[in-house]
């Protein structure tokens, strides 16, 4: 009851005209920067940090939270329409969302994304407000061994579940891990895969990899296909709103994605990429099972609405979960949360358990503003879904020229380096080759994001145990994750063997018939 009373008091404070204005401005700015590839909410909050120095701390953090939530949804817009994610957390949305747009269902994809974001944000924020102490205690159980097990589970799940073909999924994952290893080793200081170039010592930025593989790689692939490529201008934008069938297919993925994002959000180092990809893989497997049971066609790979609803819900609920370690432990679990931690220090505040006692008004007003920001996000973006969908009516040469321009500008803005543009071109050609041979891009991206984290946590674990590998399976969490790894690896193999046996039986039945 005390928690509910504190949340109601925070809601009353957040509903003042001044704080409502800051929440609206934050959501608007966040949506705008989320659309731009390479920007993201972290960069936007960093740019706003010196500007908000003279603001009241409560107003400033309401603005930052609005930018954070708005950026989460803004990245989905270009993911769906242009196959170009605004930030890494929107990568999983591209796979089914863009295919929905190609089928004339861009408005429905955008609609289920914004409603899923709203549902996940509301539920995720309430979970954070009501169960923050329990979630903080759970996050404290994760050491280096548990982090390594978590990354291994993510590798196997994405490679085996999302890609469909285990061999191609593992190939793509190894490509991503190789890219992630480029640069100076953080532990030993040894240069790896630098090919004698000083520009590669800092590694390959995730923005370059994301934009190169997804955006520019798609442009090259469309150009290589020539007249056989889809013509966006001829695509119908479809009905403006979600129908009853769409809602029936979306509400369960919304809840499943919300649960998955809420579970991963408080875990330091997990980020939003893991739950979004796992949600995509889960919805794909459930769709395959449902198609076999009912004898209907499986739409995954052709624009399934579940593949947008689940990842977008996981994305936004994980954003709410990042507030738990930030406020309760002073531990940021994302780039945006790290900058918000700097903002706390700028105002002379120290996040941690004491923050809930000394600055309770700020904490509960901030959490309440997340609920308000979710409502504003729905109000601002849902009516504009049909309007955004009409961007696909632009002539194809202009559309892809615009994607190329924004891709180049996003990469050049990182360090104003021509070498980065060369890296972008190389990665884009790699994306073209992968598409040509049917190698999925998702495992490569997750390998680039999580590969360095896995390596660092593996070394930390062995250093803490003086080289004893038993630390990797020293806790129930680690053992449970490795059991899930085994399940994720064995289930696709069993499915493959069953299909092969069924095909053999069909051949055995047909041969005697032909002889007769």
Image (spheres, grey):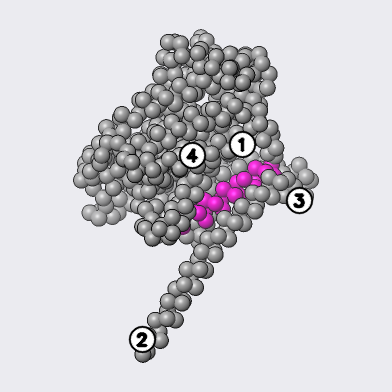
Tell me what residue is drawn at x 44 percent, y 81 percent.
508
- The image's mark for residue 255 is 4
Task: Tell me whether the residue at label 1 lies in contact with that at label 2, contact meaning CB atoms closer than 8 angstroms.
Answer: no
Cα distance between the residues tagged 1 and 4: 20 Å
Q: Nearer the viewer, residue 19 or 74?
A: 19
Name the residue carrying label 2.
Answer: 514
Helix, strand or loop at label 1? It is loop
**Residue drawn at the location 45% of the way across and 39% of the way down:** 254
Q: Earlier in the sequence, mark 3 or mark 2?
A: 3
Task: Give the overall secondary structure of the magenta segment.
Answer: helix
Mark 1 or mark 4, whichever is nearer to me: 4
Q: Nearer the viewer, residue 485 or 45?
A: 485
Q: Is residue 406 above or below residue 355?
A: below
Q: Residue furthest bottom?
A: 516
| Residue at the spot of label 1 | 267
Q: Is residue 3 magenta?
A: no
Mark 3: few, some, or many residues within 10 Å (few <14, many ≥20)?
Answer: few
Dot 4 and dot 2 residues touching (CB under 8 Å): no
Q: Residue 69: percent from the left, percent from the top?
A: 46, 28
Q: Residues within 10 Å of mark 4 (few under 14, many from 20)?
A: some
Disc 1 packing (10 Å; few <14; some 14–19; many ≥20): many
Among the two numbered marks 1 and 4 on one chain, the one whose residue lies closer to the N terminus:
4
Q: Nearer the viewer, mark 1 or mark 2?
A: 2
Helix, strand or loop for disc 2: helix
């Amino acid at each position: 009851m005390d928690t509910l009373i504190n949340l109601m008091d925070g809601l009353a404070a957040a509903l003042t005209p001044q704080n409502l204005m800051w929440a609206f401005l934050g959501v608007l700015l966040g949506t705008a920067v989320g659309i731009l590839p390479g920007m993201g909410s972290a960069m936007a909050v960093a740019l706003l940090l010196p500007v908000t120095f003279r603001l009241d701390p409560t107003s400033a953090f309401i603005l930052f939270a609005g930018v954070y939530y708005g950026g989460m949804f803004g990245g989905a817009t270009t993911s769906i329409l242009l196959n170009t994610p605004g930030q890494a957390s929107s990568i999983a949305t591209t796979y089914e969302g863009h295919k929905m747009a190609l089928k004339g269902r861009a408005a429905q994809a955008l609609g289920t994304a914004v409603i899923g974001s709203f549902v996940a944000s509301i539920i995720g924020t309430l979970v954070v407000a009501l169960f923050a102490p329990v979630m903080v205690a759970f996050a404290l159980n994760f050491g280096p061994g548990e982090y390594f097990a978590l990354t291994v589970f993510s590798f196997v799940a994405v490679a085996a579940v999302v890609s469909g073909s285990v061999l191609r999924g593992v190939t793509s994952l190894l490509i991503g891990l190789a890219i992630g290893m480029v640069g100076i080793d953080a532990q030993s200081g040894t240069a790896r895969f630098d090919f004698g170039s000083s520009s590669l010592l800092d590694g390959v930025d995730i923005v370059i990899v994301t934009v190169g593989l997804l955006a520019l790689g798609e442009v090259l692939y469309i150009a290589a296909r020539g007249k056989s490529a889809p013509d966006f201008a001829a695509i119908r934008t479809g009905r403006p709103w979600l129908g009853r069938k769409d809602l029936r297919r979306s509400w369960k993925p919304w809840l499943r994605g919300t649960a998955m994002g809420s579970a991963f959000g408080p875990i330091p180092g997990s980020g939003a990429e893991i739950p979004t990809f796992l949600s995509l893989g889960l919805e794909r497997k459930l769709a395959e099972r449902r198609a076999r049971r009912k004898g209907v066609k499986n739409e995954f790979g052709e624009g399934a609405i579940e593949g947008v609803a689940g990842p977008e819900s996981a994305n936004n609920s994980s954003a709410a979960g990042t507030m738990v370690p930030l406020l309760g432990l002073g531990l940021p679990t994302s780039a945006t949360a790290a900058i918000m931690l700097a903002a706390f220090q700028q105002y002379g505040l120290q996040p941690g358990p004491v923050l809930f006692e000394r600055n309770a008004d700020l904490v509960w007003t901030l959490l309440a503003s997340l609920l308000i920001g979710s409502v504003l996000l729905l109000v601002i973006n849902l009516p504009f879904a049909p309007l955004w969908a009409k961007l696909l009516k632009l002539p194809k040469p202009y559309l892809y020229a615009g994607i190329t321009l924004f891709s180049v500008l996003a990469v050049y803005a990182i360090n104003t380096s021509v070498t980065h543009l060369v890296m972008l071109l190389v990665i884009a050609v790699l994306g073209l080759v992968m598409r040509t041979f049917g190698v999925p891009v998702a495992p490569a991206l997750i390998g680039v994001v999580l590969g360095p984290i896995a390596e660092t946590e593996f070394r930390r674990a062995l250093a803490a145990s003086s080289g004893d590998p038993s630390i990797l399976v020293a806790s129930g969490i680690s053992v449970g994750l490795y059991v899930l790894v085994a399940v994720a690896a064995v289930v696709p193999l069993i499915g493959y063997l069953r299909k092969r046996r069924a095909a053999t039986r069909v051949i055995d039945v047909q041969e005697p018939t032909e002889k007769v």
